[in-house]
Amino acid sequence: MTHSQNDRAPAVSEDDDGLRRFATVWARVVYQATQTSMTRHEFEEFLHPLATRLNDALHAQPFSALPGYDVGETLVAGHCTSPEALPQILGVLDSYLVLYGGGPGDLDIDEARSRCARLQHTVAAGFSRSLRERTRSEQESLSRAALAAQTAVEEALHASETRFRTVFKDATIGISIADMDGRIRDANGALARMFGRSEDEMRRRNVNELVHPDDAPEVWRLHRELVRGERDHYRVEKPYHRPDGTVLWTNLTVSLLRDAEGEPRYQLSLMEDITERRLLHLRLRYEATHDELTGLPNRTLFAERLERVLGSSEEERRFGLCYLDIDGFKAVNDSLGHAVGDQLLVSVAERLQSCTPGPDHLVARIGGDEFVVLISDPSGREEVTELARQALAALATPISVDGRELSVRASIGIVEGRAGDLDPAEVLRSADITMYRAKDSGGNRYEFADPDSDARAIDRHSLTNHLPAALERDEFFLEYQPLIRMSDGRVDGAEALVRWEHPVHGRLGPDRFIPLAEHTGLIVPLGRWVLEQAVAQACGWRERSGAGDQPLRVNVNLSPRQLHHPDLVPDTIAVLESAGVPPSSLCLEVTESALIGADEDELKPLRQLAELGVEIALDDFGTGYSNLANLRRLPATTLKLDRSFTQGLQRHPADPVDVTFVEGIVSLAHALGLAVTVEGVETEHQAERLRELGCDTAQGWFYARPVAADDFVRGWTASA
Ligand code: C2E
Ligand code: CA
Ligand code: CA
């Protein structure tokens, strides 16, 4: 899918307006859920820099979700700590961040959404972590208060009954005093309220009746030690049953009170109700580790589990990972809408879960349409393969969404091995590379990771990563290969061919990096650079040529992505004008396959350039699905016949099929008013035959290899 101009990032000031609006919406939604003393307006001012940080992170290259942690922490520091706050915060980010942050900008919309999702996870993680720390420090001050209370109680116990009662009654934490048999002698109002009983009822109970089945044995060990007088206090987090069946979670401190002789007399319990906080923690933890749409564990939880599985210290323990990506999911989303896409993902999640019953399997959704199944200790390759096979089969049964039957195909990359051999990042990278390999070989299949393919992919990856810097560092240069007019053997022009002088790998040909540049979009600036260089060169040649000479033309290759770039026409005109070169001195070479299926709108830029006088050549002609009838409506002026068709003419006698073919093309082209250039002319014999067959221009090693601009001029003046 191509995005219209409207999707592009607006100027910076508009961006900031957008972020202000975002902060306003954010404040409106979240303000109620805060315990802040800020006014709404102040709160908005507080959120604005956070919005900016998130937006910067969203668009940063390379992307990192880390700033989300800080934002989450800052929100807690800003008292956004009520239980509703986090889901609301995440909801706002989800709905508005991409929108008000100036749209996806240079990012693909799916990429923008997936980045936004990852930022939400880090915000949630930062938020919960910070809240946890805060709670811990609250607990510490509370236990200090409790200790103080204890001292007061002890003093009171030894001093006067009235003072004792006052401390007891007014405390906001629950306090009880029991004898050494556990019979509760006294309990304050706060404690009774926690348990939903009256103070009298509390007084009739025994602490031992309040045991909860979830109590760790550890708690009872500590308690026995206290009762035996072997320890003076202990602190635990402990659940209790309330009469209504609900569970009360407490932070419990129990201290031993001794009499004047030092004999254990009473046990003093100080209890803080942490039920709400605990629930919030559980919820935060759940939200931070699960995918909202499918309910599956998310990337965070998967990463934790993967680390644990790989970190296992047991010798010979194995792991298996299936990394699954739905084939053509984007097309479903684009054509049937996000709602259908979402339903499809939910069904995929269900199907995957249905083929992974055991606790040894973890199914997680780790990105838009990316799922993983992690197997903790598979018996071997077979088990993992079987799982991949089952997953593909489970998805193949049509899924009914919105009255449509959709059949899901997916590509799976499998990594299986010994737990200690790879770290999590290596496993994920390898799985990802392997998944792409499955996709490249047609999809709807699984492949196994293997180190050689990994290495090749990493190589490509590193070249891709270095492309932008290479352009800035001027590591590209052009060579020129002459185009020879067959009628008189004179140089007519030259094709500019780009090369990369790589600091490590040495000189790289365009086949190594043009496809990567095309894939990442760097081809657009790189292509513009080539055009500028080549046109400047053509201008230099004009200045050197004599008065009567026909000026040399320069041929520049255009890749499909450039062809569809909105700036193609204005950029080309600007380059020609600033060099002062007439349009007819430039020929743009476009492959035939790039034009297949192009409608009139898509051909318009080329047509405009042709109307200005720029020559257009159809490159590699004959290798695509040549539809000769189509030729008529293309704005081309020249056909460049692919090397594969002229090879047969190198032989002696020439291959009759190739002769007939070339003859046919030449006469058709001429009938349509197109010139014919032949590529890959390597022998004199071949050159002669092609001239006889009526080809207009030739290019190939027989005449010259591609050379640096200066060598080109030397050769040309020598031949002239
Ligand atoms: P192409 O447009 O078909 O360029 C002709 C290729 O054939 C060049 O390979 C050239 O060196 C090679 N060649 C020329 N004469 C002979 C011959 O007699 N025998 C043989 N065997 N080969 C010959 P090169 O330089 O490796 O370029 C490969 C491709 O890379 C080009 O194919 C073109 O598609 C692309 N390319 C090169 N420069 C650019 C550029 O600036 N932009 C874009 N988009 N693509 C470029
Ligand atoms: Ca070419
Ligand atoms: Ca070609």
Image (cartoon, rainbow, N blue to C red):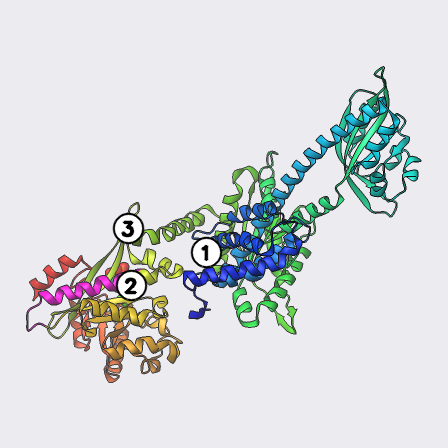
Q: Magenta span has 547? A: yes
The amino acid marked with disc number 3 is Arg
Q: CA distance from mark 3 to mark 2?
A: 16 Å
Dot 2: element: helix
Q: Residues within 10 Å of mark 1 (few under 14, many from 20)?
A: many
- Picture residue at 34% right of the left edge, 53% below the top: 467
Spot occupied by residue 414 in the image (x, y as percentages of width and height): 54, 51
Left or right placement of residue 109 versus residue 694 in this view? right
Q: From the top left corner, tell me how far across and down residue 351 is, in percent.
A: 66, 59
Q: Is residue 84 magenta?
A: no
Location of residue 252 with respect to 289 vertically, above or below? above
Tally of marks: 3
Residue at 30% across, 47% down? 505
Examine the rendering and report whether any part of residue 645 can be seen: no
Ligand 1: image quarter: bottom left
Magenta residue span = 526-549
Residue 571 figure quarter: bottom left
Q: Nearer the viewer, residue 334 or 251?
A: 251
Residue behind mark 3? 473
The structure residue drawn at horizontal position 16% and vertical position 61%, both measured from the top left corner, is 704
Q: Disc 3 and disc 1: Cα gap in Å?
A: 24 Å
Residue 385 left/right relative to 711: right
Q: Is mark 2 in CB contact (under 8 Å) with mark 1?
A: no
Q: 474 and 11: which one is in front?
A: 11
Q: Which residue type does callout 2 highlight?
A: Arg
2 or 1: mark nearer the eye: 1
Q: Which residue is mark 1?
A: 59
* Secondary structure under the numbered disc 1 in the rendered image: helix
Q: Label the magenta part by its dominant secondary structure.
A: helix
Q: Which residue is mark 2?
A: 528
